[in-house]
Amino acid sequence: MTENHKIVHIDDVEPNRRRGGDLRVLLSPKTVGSKTGFMGVTLLKPGESVAEHYHPYSDEYMFIARGTIVCRLDGEDVKMRADEAVMVPKFTRHRVENTGTEDALIVFHLCPLAPRPELGHVDTEERAGEA
């Protein structure tokens, strides 16, 4: 298979737990050479959350593939369940929490890319237990 058609398995990517949960960026400049955006998954066990942040350069598209979550968008809690999606425009503060009784799986895509990876996220909340 050519580099333009590389298959990336979830187990090929190390989890990122810096903001909470288990985030894995599957398709990115690093993994497949993408130039316009990146895509991945967030796995949340019941009660787990991803700390609030925003993206100054990118819109984020989230699809709830499994489970029930609350997505806080600029302070407003929005309940979401499997098979629902939301677009989070750039500069929108957001966090997600698994409020259900089963594991949640969220598929996300962000575009366009930030000029450098470290500029892509601005944290606005410390992770629980990290004061």
Image (tube, grey):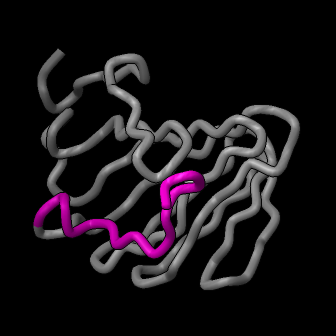
The answer to whether residue 54 is left or right of residue 119 is right
Coordinates of residue 124 in the picture (x, y in percent): 45, 75
Q: Quadrant of residue 94?
A: bottom right
Coordinates of residue 80 in the picture (x, y in percent): 78, 59
Residue 70 sits above or below residue 107 on the image = below
Residue 112 forms part of the magenta stretch: no
Coordinates of residue 101 in the picture (x, y in percent): 87, 37
Q: How many marks?
A: 0
Magenta-colored span: 116-131
Q: Nearer the viewer, residue 42 or 49?
A: 49
Q: Could you tell me which residue is drawn at 74 percent across and 33 percent down? A: 103
The answer to whether residue 52 is left or right of residue 105 is left
Residue 126 forms part of the magenta stretch: yes
Q: Could you tell me which residue is drawn at 76 percent across and 75 percent down? A: 77
Residue 7 sits above or below residue 62 on the image = above
Q: Could you tell me which residue is drawn at 76 percent across and 45 percent down? A: 47
Furthest toward the front, the residue is: 131
Coordinates of residue 64 in the picture (x, y in percent): 68, 49
- Dominant SS in magenta: loop
The answer to whether residue 100 is left or right of residue 69 is right
Q: Quadrant of residue 58?
A: bottom left
Q: Nearer the viewer, residue 4 or 14?
A: 14
The answer to whether residue 91 is left or right of residue 99 is left
- The quadrant of the image that shows the N terminus is top left
Q: Could you tell me which residue is drawn at 46 percent across and 52 percent down? A: 19
Residue 10 sits above or below residue 116 on the image = above
Q: Quadrant of residue 13?
A: top left
